[in-house]
Image (cartoon, grey):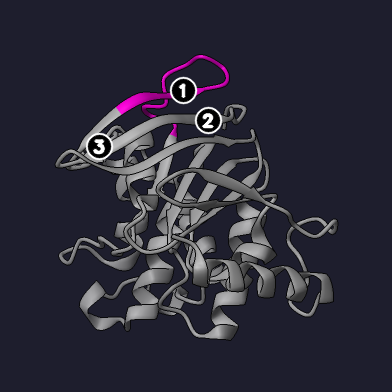
Amino acid sequence: MTASPGIRVAGQHHIGGQLLFDADITLPAGRWTCLLGRSGVGKSTVLRLMLGLETGGQFTGAVTATDGKPLKGRISYMAQSDLLLPWLSVLENVCIGARLRGAAPDVSRARSLLDRAGLLAHADKKPHMLSGGMRQRAALARTLFENRPLVLLDEPFSALDAGTRADMQELAAEVLRGCTVLLVTHDPAEATRLADQMIVMTAQAARVWPLPDTPALRAIDDPHSFECQNRLLAHLRTAA
């Protein structure tokens, strides 16, 4: 994997002539940034801009990498929906990116990731045989398997129970160490635990939120994290 650059998204996005957001967001190279905000403020739109996908509106601004190179081909993306192909097995879904590129997938690594995700015993099953949480873990394994320097995660742990969520957070933090990661989440506790930088987004601005001095991945029972997430929750309840 090549070195991970930082990313900057700066500009305004309008839908039907109405301002969705006016933001200047910088993701530090090799760090986790967690993006929070009210539903509909444009968090997923920021991800789509980075991916070069249609957003249903007009963006006036720029999306750039700190190394000056194009982002295309360097991003791994996990959407809110698992997007598993129903005719492929779980293992085949994890390896699909490599096969689409005409490369031989590292099946041993794919199996190792499925094992870490608690899905190795289900590797040969089709997606319809899995629960929602299992499908989300399979999608996470597929994203981690891509081994890209830039990783965009849109609520990747939302379908998981509390214990499994903590386990998958730890797996992602380990595998993606050194990557530039943007995690969109509605969970202040999750963001506080994982973030090297946390950004709270409104229509008017994207504000960097202060984090505890302890490094990510923070302990679940860290009292400074509790204080941070409580302040953040109170703010999110009143943010426009």
Foreground residue, 144 or 51? 51
Is disc 2 surrounded by few (<14), some (14 to 19) or many (20+) residues within 10 Å?
many
Residue of label 1: 64
Q: Which mark is residue 7?
A: 2
Identify which residue, 79 or 74, lies in the foreground.
79
Examine the image and state in which quarter residue 99 appears: top left
- Dividing the image into 4 quarters, which one contains the C terminus? bottom left
Decide: few, some or many residues near mark 3? Use Cα within 10 Å; few <14, some 14-19, many ≥20.
few
| Up/down of 156 relative to 182, above or below | below
Question: Which residue is painted at 45% across and 52% down in the image?
Answer: 202
Residue sitting at the far top: 68
What secondary structure characterizes most of the magenta part? loop
Residue drawn at (20%, 61%) of the image: 85
Is any atom of residue 188 visible in this view? Answer: yes
Q: Mark number for residue 89?
A: none
Q: First in sequence: mark 1 or mark 3?
A: 3
Give the mark, 3 or 2, whose residue is nearer the N terminus. 2
Q: Callout 3, which amino acid?
A: Leu
Q: Quadrant of residue 137?
A: bottom left
1 or 2: tag closer to the N-terminus? 2
Q: Position of residue 234 (x, y in %)?
A: 60, 73
The answer to if 72 sits in the magenta stretch is: yes
Q: CA distance from mark 1 to mark 3?
A: 15 Å
Q: Along the horizontal axis of the image, is 175 left or right of 11?
A: right
Pinpoint residue 144: horizontal percent, then vertical percent. Answer: 49, 52
Say which amino acid is labelled 2. Answer: Ile
Please say if 18 is above or below 92. above
Give the left or right position of residue 200, taking residue 62 as reference: right
Range of the magenta residues?
60-74
Label 1: few (<14), some (14–19) or many (≥20) C-alpha neighbours in 10 Å = some
Q: Which mark is residue 53?
A: 3
Give left or right: position of 177 versus 94. right
